[in-house]
Image (cartoon, rainbow, N blue to C red):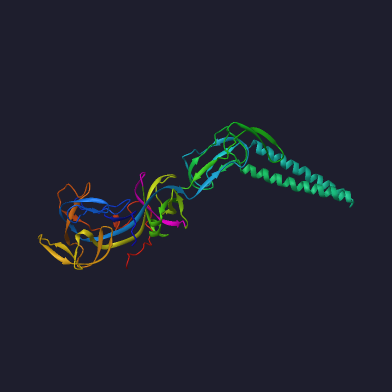
């Protein structure tokens, strides 16, 4: 596998006793391990110092390799609304910060002018129809008579459209949410006078023409802003990755998200990877779009998140700390400890190494104990004095295979290299 300085390896460990020696989730450059070989050494960019020998229990584990990036949540669905009719705002039912359902009435305007405009248009149409009927009755088949009838028919057609427009304007007296979501902007207040397509009043003056020819002059806004609704059920995150990092991932890869404002992890998938880079200051990065999966509570537009894109994931792998293995003349051995504390050097057949762990293909069984040189980097192990560590995970999430938090864990992970 190509070397990637931004790659890290995570070993998920749930339900492990307090005295366990754990493999931490490495963030940023390299992988982090809590075991050292002998003496001071450099493991994944962290200086290690021997603190003795520890026994660990061989168990099934979930091994991952990921690249990490940060970004902000953006709603997939957003909508902007404004009144399509003119008038004075008489009622406001929703404020910024409220959650609305599709069809909820946000605000309404006075219908007096709209009603007057409709009645005027209807009266003009009725008069035009009467004029047309009289011309048709008095027609003498002359060119002049035909021209008068034709003009009257055209007038009736125009006024029919005016009536239709006036009726539509009556329906636009209510501003209705056409999608469910969080209202992030609501500029209307009772008493505002708005014109069609505008938001609340800002004190500037202007005129509007209603259907039927009625013209009003009122204080109206000069901005284009209106009510903004942000969907709460679909979220996307855009991150930037280096060329080396992009080479590791693919569309459909699983993503694990964390955020300061959200308890636990939530999940997603890679949905798009830019074909061309963006170059800034001589450094090329690629835009990668990530989609949150599942129904996750507590997400908001603009929330900062950390995204770990998992490009390799193996579940239920019998694996041991790599530095528990000694290799000489092509033979790999480990130190097995029996129930009486006696140690045995045993040859093992190994598979792939992922970060600080190596897969065991033959020679060990789940539940056996190994003697491993323990190392410290900051805080490691436990103050309980227990010398044993339990690495068994069974490849499951807490609660019998379910997610530790909301959201769904997508599948489709890549296979272990060389398999």
Q: Which image quarter is the N terminus in?
A: bottom left
State which region is magenta: 259-274
Q: From where the camera sits, is residue 395 visible?
A: no
Image side of residue 353 versus residue 215, left or right: left
Foreground pick, 297 / 255:
255
Image side of residue 71 versus residue 224, left or right: left
Query: Residue 127, how many percent across, how many down?
Result: 78, 42
The residue lying at 19 percent from left, 48 percent from top is 382
Image side of residue 142 versus residue 257, left or right: right
Image side of residue 1 versus residue 48, left or right: right
In the image, is residue 361 above or below residue 109? Answer: below
Query: Residue 295, how many percent across, how many down?
Result: 41, 51
Q: In the rendered structure, does residue 17 fall within the stretch colored magenta?
A: no
Foreground pick, 133 / 278:
278
Query: Residue 44, how many percent across, how many down?
Result: 27, 54
Foreground pick, 358 / 189:
358
Q: Residue placed farthest to the front in the image?
A: 282
Query: Residue 130, how many percent across, how many down?
Result: 80, 45
């Amino acid at each position: 596998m190509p070397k990637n300085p931004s790659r890290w390896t995570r070993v998920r460990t749930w339900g492990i006793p307090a005295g366990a020696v754990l493999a931490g989730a490495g963030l940023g450059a390299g992988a982090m391990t809590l075991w050292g070989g002998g003496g001071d050494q450099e493991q994944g960019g962290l200086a290690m110092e021997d603190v003795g020998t520890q026994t660990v229990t061989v168990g099934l584990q979930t091994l991952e390799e990921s690249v990490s990036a940060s970004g902000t949540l953006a709603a997939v669905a957003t909508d902007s609304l404004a009144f399509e009719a003119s008038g004075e705002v008489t009622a406001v039912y929703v404020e910024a910060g409220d959650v609305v359902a599709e069809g909820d009435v946000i605000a309404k305007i006075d219908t007096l002018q709209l009603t007057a405009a409709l009645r005027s248009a209807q009266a003009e149409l009725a008069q035009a129809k009467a004029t047309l009927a009289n011309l048709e009755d008095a027609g003498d088949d002359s060119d002049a008579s035909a021209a008068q009838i034709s003009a009257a028919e055209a007038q009736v057609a125009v006024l029919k459209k005016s009536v239709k427009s006036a009726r539509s304007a009556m329906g636009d007296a209510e501003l209705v949410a056409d999608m469910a979501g969080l209202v992030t902007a609501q500029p209307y207040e009772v008493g505002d006078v708005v014109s069609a397509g505008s938001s609340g009043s800002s004190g500037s003056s202007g005129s509007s023409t209603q259907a039927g020819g009625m013209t009003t002059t009122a204080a109206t806004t000069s901005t284009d802003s209106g009510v903004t609704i942000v969907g709460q059920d679909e979220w996307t995150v855009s991150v930037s990755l280096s060329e080396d990092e992009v080479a590791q991932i693919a569309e459909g890869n699983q993503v694990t998200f964390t955020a300061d404002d959200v308890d636990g992890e939530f999940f997603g998938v890679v949905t798009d990877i830019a074909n061309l880079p963006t170059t800034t200051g001589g450094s090329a990065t690629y835009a990668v779009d990530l989609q949150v999966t599942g129904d996750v509570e507590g997400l908001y537009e603009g929330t900062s998140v950390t995204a770990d894109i998992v490009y390799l994931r193996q579940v239920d792998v019998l694996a041991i700390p790599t530095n528990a293995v000694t290799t000489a003349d092509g033979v790999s051995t480990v130190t097995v400890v029996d129930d009486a504390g006696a140690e045995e050097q045993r040859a093992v057949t190994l598979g792939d190494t992922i970060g600080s762990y190596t897969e065991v293909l033959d020679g060990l069984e789940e539940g056996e104990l190994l003697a491993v040189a323990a190392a410290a980097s900051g805080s490691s192990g436990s103050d309980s004095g227990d010398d044993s560590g339990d690495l068994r995970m069974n490849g499951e999430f807490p609660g019998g295979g379910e997610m530790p938090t909301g959201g769904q864990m997508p599948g489709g992970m890549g296979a272990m290299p060389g398999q």
